[in-house]
Amino acid sequence: MQKILPFLLLIFLISCKEENKSKPPNSASSPKGDTLQVEFAKGFSAVDYGTHKILKVSNPFPESDKTYTYLLTRSGEKPPKDIDYDERVNIPIEKIVVTSTTHIPSLESLEVENTLVGFPDLDYISSPKTRQRIEEDKIADLDQNENINLEVLLSLQPDAVIGFSMKENNKVYSNISNAGTPVIFNGDWNEENPMGKAEWIKFFGVMYDKEAEAEKHFETIKENYESAKALISQEVEEKPTVLSGAMYQDVWYLPGGKSWMAQFIADAGGNYLYKNTDETGSLSLSFESVFDKARDAEIWIAPSGFTSFEQMKEDSKHYTEFEAFKNKQLYGYTATKGETGGVLYFELAPNRPDLVLKDLIKIFHPELLADYENTFFKALE
């Protein structure tokens, strides 16, 4: 995620308008509909009933115990009156505000990026296509995600705001909703499976009546991923040992054994030294613990935001004691940036797991992808 750098999570006016929108979700009275096929993602589902669609989002924030129900209706159609929902949205969407750069690639893949009218802190966006629209003043800057400029947002009159938040009780989104603009939460970043993150393009497909296009795009990514993964199962006998992460204030943060990065490493033919841990997020360990276990690791990936060996040495001389450091086998993802400094990995990687996988295969087993040029992971300078 573009706005969450390693170890630094950014925790994300109009008087309240009394509306009875947040009822317990229940659409049992609706007729049988066409259920969207979702293979890997666990955080959303959708059913098309003809006169309307029901989009449900679960687990959009950590420890969330609520499923949000969104009623999507087209102009001129009348859905049943007894449907309970949290927000109602007119589709296909003509104007949208998104709040995470991970949403940008989905809009571009569906060729609806022209509907994007606002985003918090435009400098984070890396995509050349969307940056061109920013240069043409077609996308408004809404300030910071945790302090969205409500006046500017309302002046844009978006059909919906796609919300990204680290917590359930978000005053900013409550104000937006109470002012009459629907907020739909997106939890793509909460998915643990790499393909699950990418499958959220179908979430956007539902709102633009582009389910078929979203399915086609996702299937292409899936086929690319499986083809790359097959190279490992067919050709690889020895797997290099792999370390990840770095220290922040004397604590070493690194991916847990059930995290999406651990899955990438396994699929790319790497032997991640912390693969047997149960955490789906990050581990927090002491330097001594990591050094004892991983000092001889052959390859070190994603060492926080470092882009050079000199930076790492200046930050902590302890890093120089690892074999991967001595052998110049360090690879990071923060060197590839957009023209205003946004890190491309945070924006595009969740949507293109096939490219992440190929990057890691190129690092772990370069002979398998001799002509491939890495997209995200590059050797440190």
Image (tube, grey):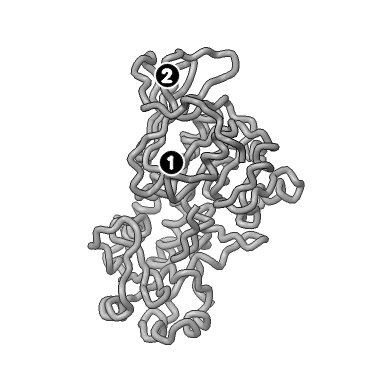
Q: Which image quadrant for residue 303?
A: bottom left
Front-most of residues 250 and 281: 250
Q: Nearer the viewer, mark 1 or mark 2?
A: 2
At label 1, counting other C-alpha atoms closer than 10 Å, the crowd grade (few under 14, some 14-19, many 20 or more) is many
Total labels drawn: 2
Residue shown at the point (65%, 43%) measured from the top left: 118
Q: Which mark is residue 199?
A: 1
- Which residue is tagged 2? 83
| Left or right placement of residue 104 versus residue 87 in this view | right
Residue 80 appearing in the image: yes
Front-most of residues 338 and 189: 189
Residue shown at the point (37%, 73%) measured from the top left: 299
Q: Which mark is residue 145?
A: none
- Secondary structure under the numbered disc 1 in the rendered image: loop
| Residue with the most extreme right position | 136
Residue 226 appearing in the image: no
Amino acid on which disc 1 is placed: Glu
